[in-house]
């Protein structure tokens, strides 16, 4: 099994040592940097390829927020998940970090289990994103004139359908990730009734996918389908995703909430809205969402 390459950025040598000790039994290869500038030099090295950055916020020379901004501005590094570990945990500071693109927040001091849970969740999401991009490469675009609707019931079907739809979009990668978030939400929260708290615990226990598969096979769920409608116009593409659930309190998930910054889930809808969608509109009780992607002139 190949190892995940992790870059640990912290100006305190003891903190770097503790993080390395926490991760030593996992499938990880660790590099360390004492400030953001050194970390940036390591990231820019053409021979390096990092899968995850564990980042201190407050450092001399170049702090964590500065490094995060550099990473998000470069396509080579923009999709590397970042776990920010910091003592700066005011609501404003947490919101700033989430909006800047960090994946998780950890409050110093934290326990080994908290770090391992965050690392595992971030790398699992990265693995899924890479599989999605591979899937995307295998699917030809839907014909431009087509107005189509498809049904789906499982996580795998949602991911394949998102890749097929996204292949028609100006930015297929971000579109695929955003659509996948919304379609998975239709399956797990909508049709299967997995609550936010339940998913948090399932993520911590690393049993989320198993529980989704179990619930899909239950007699009361076996016939349930979610639906995704695709319509391409002259200037935009509109996707409508609906499920058979009772809906949810969707409004509080449209933005990054600092209160959820330390949970292993709860960012998907807000991330989807920021990825590529021109508009994201939940309707009624939340079991239907309509998203729009504007087409560039060269795509029309």
Image (cartoon, rainbow, N blue to C red):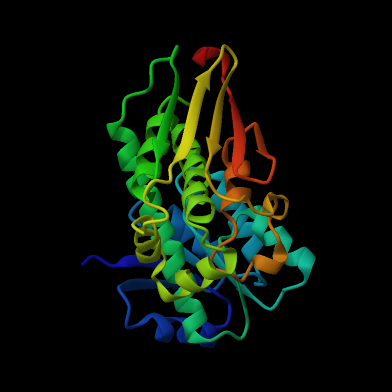
Q: Left of 26 or right of it: where is 101? A: right
What x and y, as percent, mark residue 106? 60, 75
Q: Is residue 216 visible?
A: yes
> Would you identify the image quadrant in which residue 262 lies?
bottom right
Front position in the image: 14 or 130: 130
* Residue 43 placement (x, y as % from top left): 45, 57
The answer to which of 277 and 80 lies nearer the viewer is 277
Can residue 55 be seen here? Answer: no
Question: Is 85 above or below relative to 113?
Answer: above
Residue at the extreme front of the image, as rendered:
219
User: Toward which corner of the image does residue 283 lie, by quadrant?
Assistant: top right
Name the spot of residue 83 as percent of width and height, x first: 54, 67
Residue 244 position in % (x across, y down):
52, 45
Q: Is residue 27 left or right of residue 71?
A: left
Residue at left 51%, top 80%? 114
Name the residue at 48% across, 55% down: 188
């Amino acid at each position: 099994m190949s190892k995940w390459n992790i870059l640990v950025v912290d100006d305190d040598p003891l903190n770097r040592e503790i993080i390395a000790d926490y991760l030593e039994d996992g499938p990880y290869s660790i590099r360390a940097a004492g400030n953001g500038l050194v970390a940036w030099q390591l990231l820019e090295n053409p021979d390096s390829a990092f899968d995850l950055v564990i980042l201190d916020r407050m450092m001399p020379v170049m702090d964590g927020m500065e490094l995060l901004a550099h990473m998000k501005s470069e396509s080579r590094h923009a999709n590397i998940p970042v776990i920010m570990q910091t003592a700066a945990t005011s609501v404003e500071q947490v919101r700033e970090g989430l909006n800047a693109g960090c994946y998780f927040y950890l409050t110093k001091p934290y326990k080994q289990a908290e770090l391992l849970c965050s690392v595992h969740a971030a790398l699992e999401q990265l693995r899924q994103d890479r599989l999605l991009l591979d899937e995307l490469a295998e699917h030809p675009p839907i014909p431009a004139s087509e107005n189509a609707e498809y049904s789906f019931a499982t996580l795998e079907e949602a991911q394949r359908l998102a890749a097929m739809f996204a292949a028609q979009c100006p930015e297929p990668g971000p579109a695929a990730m955003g659509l996948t978030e919304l379609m998975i939400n239709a399956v797990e929260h909508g049709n299967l009734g997995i609550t936010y708290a339940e998913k948090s615990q399932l993520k911590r226990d690393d049993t989320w996918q198993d529980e989704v598969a179990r619930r899909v096979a239950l007699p009361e769920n076996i016939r349930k389908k979610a639906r995704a409608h695709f319509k391409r116009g002259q200037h935009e593409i509109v996707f409508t995703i609906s499920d058979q659930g009772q809906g949810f309190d969707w409004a509080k998930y449209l933005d990054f909430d600092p209160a959820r910054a330390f949970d292993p889930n709860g960012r998907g809808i807000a991330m989807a809205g920021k990825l590529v969608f021109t508009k994201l509109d939940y309707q009624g009780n939340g079991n239907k969402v309509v998203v729009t992607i504007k087409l560039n002139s060269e795509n029309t």
